[in-house]
Image (spheres, grey):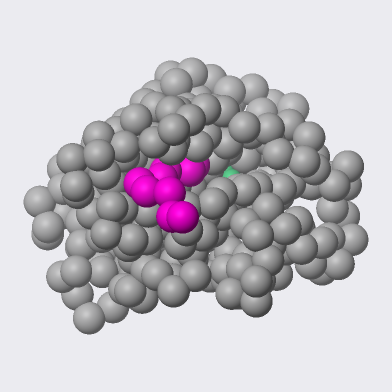
Amino acid sequence: EAVRPVVISTWRHGLAANDAAWKILDAGGSALDAAEAGVRITEADPEVRTVGLGGRPDRDGIVTLDAAIMDGGGDCGSVAALEDILHPISVARRVMEDTPHVMIVGDGARQFAISQGFEPTELLIDASRLDWEEWKKNNPDYRPPINVENHDTIGLLTLDKNGNIAAACTTSGAAYKYHGRVGDSPLIGAGLYADDQVGAATATGWGEAVIRACGSFLVVELMRQGHSPTEACRLAVERVIEKNPDYREIQVGFIALDKQGNTGGYCIHPDFDYAVYTPDGGNQLVVPDSKL
Ligand code: SD4
């Protein structure tokens, strides 16, 4: 018996994103519209210091954003290293729908966004600028920190009343990264993947480790082979561990949704949580099992 609709998203800030996505699904809207609307809440929230407005800058003090969106039919769009635009997820959707391309980066992405009517906005808030100035003082070697806290992307997966699936992922990336660094989040198959035949997955944590394992694609393929969402996430974390000998220093978490509406997640370190919205359970925070 399939459960519909369903929304699942990463971290505690996923609760507010789920609410926005749920409104659309409950009214009969599409998985794709709901995924976009959900993560726009997080992008616009300056209290979330890892996504959109208020996101931590790179080591040069510049906020650069990565985002991607995918529908279960296979269509997808993404932007990376985008500056000055409040809603990168909506720019990613325009790349998907209004260009022959999948991915546009850097200054080209900014120009594309402006040509589509997006207004340039200052994304660096005072609190994030002050943190960065403090970080610079204490890090004369000017290298981004690798640790278990440097994360909190929002990735959000939706299943609509018609059984269609979508995924969205948006982030300011690793704090104090090299200028121009791109993480897993805007890479189709790494930061997210969706397939109406199977389900969808998204990742959070140290993006380099997720990229090495093609993380989200791997989760979906494991579900295709018959694994439950949680088991698929656990096996993908095992693969990440194989490919990243430094895994004790980093966090990686996956969440997944299958086409029947089952959800799950798994991570390396125990500090990860995610939000699930179902017709029976309402909107709830879930703490998954972890490797360590
Ligand atoms: C990245 N996966 O850019 C993202 C980081 C993250 O908040 O989860 N950031 O590596």
Image point (40%, 70%), residue name: 196
Decide: is 258 above or below 155: below
Image point (37%, 48%), residue name: 4
Q: Which residues are magenta?
A: 1-9
Return the x and y of residue 267 as percentages of the image width and height.
73, 46
Return the x and y of residue 200 as percentages of the image width and height.
49, 61
Image point (58%, 36%), residue name: 274
Q: Is residue 167 magenta?
A: no
The residue furthest bottom is 100
Count every numbered label the image shows and give the total. 0
Return the x and y of residue 123 as percentages of the image width and height.
35, 34
Image point (65%, 47%), residue name: 265
Return the x and y of residue 139 as percentages of the image width and height.
74, 34
Could you tell me if residue 170 is visible in this image? no
Q: Is residue 198 left or right of residue 207?
A: left
Q: Which is nearer the eye, 242 or 198? A: 198
Q: Is residue 135 left or right of residue 156?
A: right
Q: Which is nearer the eye, 270 or 42? A: 270
Q: Is residue 19 left or right of residue 224?
A: left
Could you tell me if residue 246 is visible in this image? yes
The quarter holding residue 113 reads bottom left
Q: Which is nearer the eye, 3 or 75? A: 3
Q: Is residue 6 magenta?
A: yes
The quarter holding residue 133 reads top right
Decide: is 130 above or below 214: above
Q: Quadrant of the C terminus?
A: top right
